[in-house]
Image (cartoon, helix red, strand yellow):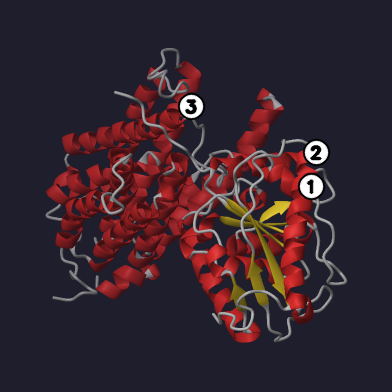
Amino acid sequence: MNTIERLFGWRHALDHPVSLGVTVSVGALLLLAPLLIALVNRLARPEERLRRELWQRYASWLLIAPAVMLPVLAGAAWTVLAVTALSLACYAEYARATGLFREKLLSALVVGGILALNFAALDHWYALFAALVPLWAGLLVVAGILRDRPQGYIQRVALALLGFMLFGAALAHLSLFANDANYRPMLLMLLLCVQLNDVFAFCVGKTFGRRKLAPNTSPGKTLAGGLGALLLTTLLAVALGRLVFAGTALESWPLLVLMGVMISVLGQLGDLTLSSIKRDLGIKDMGALLPGHGGVLDRFNSVLLAAPALFHLAHYLLPAVGHGQAARIITGG
Amino acid sequence: MRAWHYTPAADFGLAPGERVKCVRREAGLVASLLLRLFWALVRLYLRVWHRIRVQGLEKLPRETPFVLVANHTSHLDALVLGAFLPSRLRDRVYPISAGDTFFAKRSVGWFAALCLNALPLWRRKTCARALSELRERLAAGRCGYILFPEGTRARDGALAEFKPGLGMLVAGTSTPVIPCHIEGAYDAWPPGKQLPRPRRLTLRVGNALAFNGLPDERAGWEAAAVEAHHSVQKLAQRVTCGGFPGARSPSRL
């Protein structure tokens, strides 16, 4: 596949059976969901508040699902653009919640770092990407000194570094995936597994959950929900991974199970990471952009840790993510 | 180890539409950039189209908190008062504007919030709560207001009485109130006219007033309004007498 086709070749959107399958299933789910919600409302007769929340959540999903899937399907360039927008939106919520947004220089540098990382990914210049993470971290550490105001230095620099690592470095791995000719099924598999992981945990937890997983961090999560999600997500990941990674070293069962467990566990840990941040700040949601969900971060927290882990697993085992694709497509050399 | 102290954005957790109308609104990175850009354009416009003169530029505040008050005859007034403040304060200066004029329509509200950094005060509904929120915010020290205590643009161009709302913001605090007078704005763009005409504007900045001796109650509020009104009137009279020091060689900006 040549570079232009990878970047903009929407005609290849549904070439891979997993891309087709995921797109069709998500589309079908979005079409069927109103019927399901109406059925639940008719049979279970939940109270008004829950009923409204169900519809709100559905309306938000109508927005989120296309916003996530269309760029991935449309081409690598759009994928990188969407990931950049997602990173910036997540950082903006984090910065406003922690108060870091008042440190204009540090905030601008984190934004600059997010743009730089995604540029490196778009350029398919892995060495630059790898170099940017520690070097930009150093830049933030230095920028914190500049105003000669040591009071609060550790707090503001640490907040900036955490924001840069989670919403810059970690999320930009989604952009790195886009350098692979086969990036669509990989990303769709990851995103679907991570999002369903949350749904599985919620449903299993509501049905069987008794013991709390981490009551101080996130009172809603139960051990049963976590284990149920682990089982179901791993099954889903293995089934999809079998197709996505057919013909590669990742095709073997033990590795696929490892991958599934990794996605599920890291997805839940990402969720708990954000819960810890919110608890520490004393807030419930990270924003109010998505009715029923909260902020963008409340929806995408579970991708934060899973994305880099899956990327490096694949990068290590696949020869490389982006193997055979032209490198440094913008900078040349 | 002592826990860190976080201060989330004061308008945190509001939907975008609510944020626009919130008097606790704080500008983020994008809004700050927009504000700097917009106000640079405003300054250019005032210099070119209105050949603006500023007398007493050095009396404009360099730090927050403060309240700038002036006579109000035109939509140009807020632009004139805001344009010559230090640009690093740009995202912390809030013109207090009429909610029913600037925030009733959504598009106008977004413009007022993003470009002017304006905060709404609803004239018809009782605005006592909003005023006390504004007072708290001012006392916290991280903001400055541009306020027209007459409450509306003077339809005849003459200076009307000041409303006690100004006093409700500052009575009993050491927040400096800087009286200003704007000349020529009524001629350039009076109420009812569609577009501003290229008339010369003059901004006169007076000496800062402090109202820390006044009680935070009706008597104090009214006394503050009267004193501020008196100061603005004095600045206005200097215009007609022509006795203002430096009036012969005003600094062209």
Gap in Å between the C-alphas at discs 2 and 1? 8 Å
Q: Amino acid at mark 3?
A: Cys
Residue A154 place in picture, x, y as percent = 28, 39
Q: Position of residue B151 (x, y in %)?
A: 80, 57
Q: Residues within 10 Å of mark 1 (few under 14, many from 20)?
A: many
- Chain assignment, label 1: B
Instruction: Judge depth for marks 1 and 3 and give the one in front.
Output: 1
Query: On the picture, is A247 further left or further right than A281?
Result: left
Mark 1 highlights which residue? B164
Residue type, label 2? Arg
* Residue situated in front as seen by the camera: B148 or B127: B148
Residue B174 in view? yes
Q: Which residue is mark 3?
A: A203
Kind of element beneath mark 2: helix
First reached walking from the N terminus: tag 2 or tag 1: 1
Which mark is nearer the camera, 2 or 3?
2
Quadrant in which residue A329 is drawn: bottom left
> Do the residues under discs 1 and 3 have CB atoms within 8 angstroms?
no
Give whichever of A174, A250 is nearer the camera. Answer: A174
Q: Are marks 2 and 1 on the same chain?
A: yes
The residue that label 2 is drawn on is B218
> Is B147 positioned to the left or the right of A153 in the image?
right
Q: Secondary structure at mark 3?
A: helix
Which residue does the image show at 19% across and 36% down from the upper left?
A253
Please state the chain letter of the residue tagged with numbered disc 3 in the rendered image: A
Say if residue A321 shows up in the picture: no
Residue A2, picture quadrant: bottom left
Separation of disc 2 and disc 3 at Cα? 58 Å
